[in-house]
Amino acid sequence: MEAQRTCDVLVVGSGIAGCSAAIEAARRGARVVVASLGATFSGSSFYGGTWGLGLVGPSGEADVEDFEQTIHTVGGGVANPTLVHELVLGVAPAVRWLEEMGVELKYPTDASERAYIPCFDHKTRSWHGVGRASLKDTWSREFAQLGIAVLPRCELVDLVVRDGCICGAQLFSHEAGAAVSVACPAVVLATGGLAGLYARSLNPADNAGSAQGIALAHGCQLVNAEFLQIMPGLVRPKAGIVVNEKAFRYSTLAFPADLLEERSGYGPFTTRLASHVIDLAIAQAGDTGLPLGYALPHDPPEFVQTYFSWLERAQGIRATNPMRMALYAHASNGGIAIREDTSCKGGPAGLFACGECAGGMHGADRIGGLASASALVFGRRAGVEAACLAGGAAPVHWDGPVPCASASSGTKALAEKLRHTMSAHALVGRTEEGLTAALDAVAAMRNCLQEGESLHGSVQGLRLAHQLRAAEAMLGAMRARSESLGSHHRADSGA
Ligand SMILES: Cc1cc2nc3c(=O)[nH]c(=O)nc-3n(C[C@H](O)[C@H](O)[C@H](O)COP(=O)(O)OP(=O)(O)OC[C@H]3O[C@@H](n4cnc5c(N)ncnc54)[C@H](O)[C@@H]3O)c2cc1C
């Protein structure tokens, strides 16, 4: 049976961006509901495949200009200056906000250590480590105190829009096995990036990448969607664990020391630097992965030590164990185009987007530690803006099919095919021919789905329809970028 709820602000997603939005909106008196496909406190923000998250900002006011300039340089000139400015100015207040709430942040013992130079950056900045446990404990208390209602395992199926304004959303509760309608004047999308569209992904399964497709269906635009971070991760002894880039210089890989040194300066693949040949070798090794060994110094730098201690404690893997690594889809640098108040360009009034599902504040390559920063800064802003719309919520008029949970084997097979198509053609080694083949495959899948069960309203069929729309936009942006670079350039990510 379908459940009905009413609130002022519906936040979709409970990673860093969604939780920040929910807390800010509730502190302004809004009645807030947080729905997430995963558990409450999920997404990349709470993913167990790494020790925690680095959070980076300018080291004081004197550093603001250099930091902004570096973001634009590293981003290849495609970041939006207004959003970059907002982001950079918002980090220090966001760090204070976390600490005042009681979140325990990690500080470097020696902040000038070169391992604390953020990925792709040229100098150290203000660095903090964010641990999942402290974040979750603090925010659980905060949610309870503020009366924020949560709907875990509850998926956004569509937005309800009337006369160009948000008036609610249609959800599906995987816990109850039933549809849920929410009437509200504001929806905040905080649903994470597009890496979940790939078979080899470092994202948790609940990062569906469908909300970008829903946003597109309601007139929103994607910006910089072609720029995806592609990261080396372990495939053995355990898959889905991030390889710490700072330790490349201590690896036994058969590459010259200067290339390994350069590769230690950044996590995701880029075409801008000579050391990308290391990634090409990893890509060539395919699913089996490239063998990886380490000869760590007796007293490794703190940052490297933190990673290997976590690897042994949490994953049972020692630096001396034989390992293999492959390239994974990791995080989006682009997403739903937003204005500085986080409202969605081209979208209905009352729709906001923040965190990794939103784009414009990063360029082609992104300085490490700025994804968590962006989720905090724009998440807080979205909560403040959405709360301003608190008041009457019109009744929901959902005229689409009421979703149910009955995916056919055909839908499951198509979803699997999409993930494999993306991994085959839209990771490292992209070509115009490959991207065109992927776009043709996506079009064929859409036809197949339309003839099949999506019209009958299975939640998996509806999700796949949105994922296919998002994938088509992403692949189209990749192909357009490759055409604009000319045929002598590669179409891979990176500036
Ligand atoms: C392994 C790893 C390491 C990383 N390390 C760093 C780092 O050190 N520094 C850094 O800055 N960044 C890092 N990142 C990136 C960073 O973690 C993310 O960009 C950031 O946490 C995203 O936060 P978010 O709140 O926007 O989305 P997420 O944390 O991904 O949350 C997405 C939420 O949306 C929900 N959701 C998705 N689709 C739907 C739907 N249709 N309906 C309902 N709910 C939905 C999910 O269940 C989840 O709750 C890392 C990412 C990974 C994967």
Image (cartoon, grey):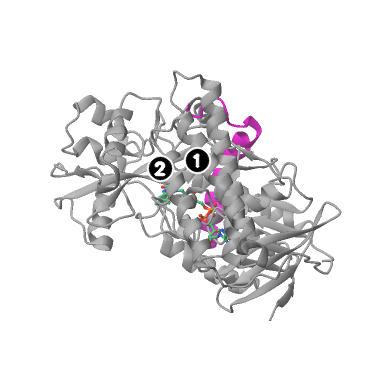
Q: Residues within 10 Å of mark 1 (few under 14, many from 20)?
A: many
Which SS class for mark 2? helix
Taking the magenta stretch, the answer to whether it contains residue 79 is yes
Q: Which mark is residue 438?
A: 1
- Residue drawn at (40%, 25%) of the image: 272
**Range covered by the magenta-colored residues:** 74-102
Asked whether the beta carbons under mark 2 and mark 1 sit within 8 Å of each other, the answer is: yes
Secondary structure predominantly adopted by residues drawn in magenta = helix
Which residue is label 2 attached to? 424
- The three-letter code of the residue at mark 2 reads Ala
Determine if residue 245 is in view. yes
Q: Give x and y (percent) for residue 17.
A: 57, 54
Q: Give x and y (percent) for residue 385.
A: 73, 52
- Residue drawn at (72%, 71%) of the image: 181
Q: Give x and y (percent) for residue 228.
A: 48, 40
Q: Nearer the viewer, residue 65 or 186?
A: 186
- Residue drawn at (56%, 47%) of the image: 444
From the image, which quarter does the N terminus lie in?
bottom right
Which SS class for mark 1? helix
Q: Say above or below: 476 vs 379.
A: above
Indicate which disc, 2 or 1, sits on the residue closer to the N terminus: 2
Q: Say above or below: 124 vs 24.
A: above
